Amino acid sequence: MDKQTVQSAIYVGLNDAETGVQRFDTEKYVSILRNVCRHYHVAFSFHLTNGGYFHDDGRYTEENTLVLMLMEVPEETVTLIAKDLCAFFHQESVMVTTSPCAVVFVREGLDE
């Protein structure tokens, strides 16, 4: 049977807010992300993607982005995680999305 829940995603760019370039290698950011999730005791998945956006002043930027996926995490906790990642990654802001979803766990084994 499907379980209805909420999925949250936090999009964190890796370019520094002041310099506009990625300061550290991606693995360092991944390590920080994992430590933040462990601190908040949340299960998580993430993936690396690349995206572009326009600044308020019209400048266009492309950067590597980590997308953190969280299931069934309270909104307050998602916000705290987003704030920590924004500060630790030295970002102007991070984007948080939420959407309803159904979760199904499928189990199967091989008979010998």
Image (cartoon, rainbow, N blue to C red):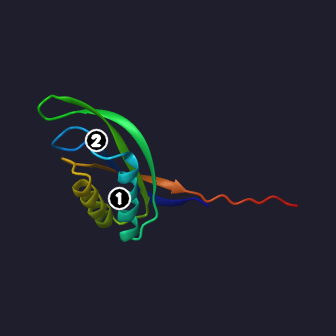
Label 2: how many Cα within 10 Å (few below 14, some 14–19, many 20+): some
Instruction: State the quadrant of the N terminus.
Output: bottom right
Q: Mark 2 belongs to which amino acid? A: Gln
**In the image, what residue occupies the spot 34% across and 34% down?**
51
Q: Nearer the viewer, residue 2 or 75?
A: 75
Residue 85 in sight from this viewpoint: yes
Above or below 15: residue 33: below
Say which quarter of the image contains residue 22: top left
Q: Where in the figure is residue 89, as x and y percent of width and height?
A: 26, 52
Image coordinates of residue 61 in percent, x first then y, are 24, 31
SS for callout 1: helix
Q: Nearer the viewer, residue 40 or 102?
A: 40
Q: Position of residue 46 (x, y in %)?
A: 44, 51
Q: Is residue 40 visible?
A: no
Query: Residue 5 has which mark?
Result: none
| Comes first in the chain, label 1 or label 2 | 2
* Residue behind mark 1: 32
Labelled disc at residue 22: 2
